[in-house]
Image (cartoon, rainbow, N blue to C red):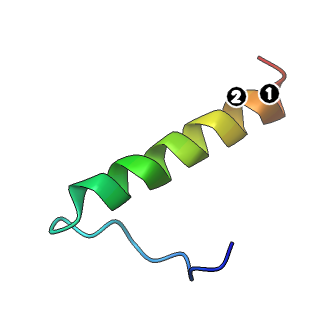
Amino acid sequence: MKKTVRPADPADPAGARRILNCWTMMTQAWKGG
């Protein structure tokens, strides 16, 4: 990742959603689901 991972900013819902989606996909892939 080029960007530094920062806590989800309430003023940036799009960024927060993107981060959440990234984590969801990573966890699902890690679980093998």
Q: Position of residue 12 (x, y in %)?
A: 23, 65
In this rendering, the answer to whether 12 lies above or below 19 is below
Residue 11: image location, x then y, percent: 15, 69
Quarter of the view holding residue 31: top right
- Dividing the picture into quarters, in which one does residue 6 lie? bottom left
Picture coordinates of residue 2, whole percent (x, y)? 65, 79
Q: Secondary structure at mark 1?
A: helix
Count neighbours of disc 1 (C-alpha within 10 A) and say few if under 14, some if 14 to 19, many if 20 or more.
few
In the rendering, which numbered label is found on residue 31?
1
Tell me if 3 is positioned left or right of 33 in this view: left
Q: Which residue is mark 2?
A: 28
Check the image and report above or below for 2 versus 10: below
> Residue at position x 58%, y 46% from top?
23
Density class for disc 2 (Cα within 10 Å; few <14, some 14-19, many ≥20) is few
Which residue appears at 57% of the width and 46% of the height?
22
Q: Is residue 32 above or below residue 14?
A: above
Q: Secondary structure at mark 2?
A: helix
* Residue kind at label 1, given as amino acid type: Lys
Query: At 29% across and 54% down in the image, what residue appears?
Result: 14
